[in-house]
Amino acid sequence: MASAVRHVTIDCADAYALGSFWAEVLGASLADDDNPGDPEALVRAPGVGLLFITVPEHKTVKNRVHLDLQPQDRTRDEEVERLLSLGAVLVADHRRPDGTGWAVLADPEGNEFCVERSAAERAG
């Protein structure tokens, strides 16, 4: 058997705070033993966990790996608005007048991610 991805690990300045943001984004929860000030925080999301690790270095360049999110129970634009209200920032808007495209956002520490159209929007 080949290897399996256990976690996607993200370096950050505050593992608990950023993990809490992503738990809200994904409708997931942090591991029961994660607390403010801990050097690690694990978001148990369906499919694969996101592991946040506090490091002393700050983000200085564009991510080489990023997450693409697909809303499950709302439209892409509704999800973008929800994520902005959680503290994300719009980095680049690639949404087109015909409804196609995506939005690039950044989490509170500047890590970019994309929000694509929902399956319902793709089917319609």
Image (tube, grey):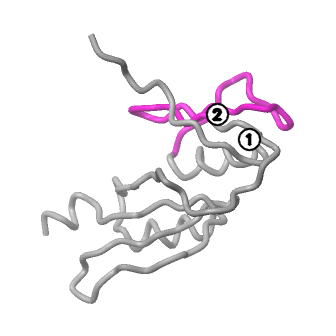
Q: Nearer the viewer, residue 97 or 13?
A: 13
- Dot 2 amino acid type: Leu
Seen at 53% across and 66% down, the residue is 82
Residue 52 location, x and y as percent?
66, 38
Q: Secondary structure at mark 2?
A: strand
Q: Pointer 1: residues within 10 angstroms few (<14), some, or many (20+)?
A: many
Relative to 68, residue 82 above or below:
below
Name the residue tied to disc 2.
Answer: 30
Seen at 82% across and 44% down, the residue is 56
Relative to 122, residue 25 above or below:
above
Name the residue tied to disc 1.
Answer: 15
Mark 1 vs mark 2, foreground winner is 1
Q: Secondary structure at mark 1?
A: helix
Residue 46 location, x and y as percent?
42, 34
Q: Quadrant of residue 58?
A: bottom right
Residue 42 included in the magenta stretch of the image: yes
Q: Which residues are magenta?
A: 27-51
Q: What quarter of the picture does the C terminus occupy?
A: bottom left
Pointer 1 and pointer 2: residues touching (CB < 8 Å)?
A: no
Earlier in the chain: of badge 1 and badge 2, it is 1
Residue 65 — which label? none
Q: Quadrant of residue 88?
A: bottom right
**Apparent side of residue 25 relative to residue 39 in the rendered image (left or right):** left
Residue 112 location, x and y as percent?
54, 62
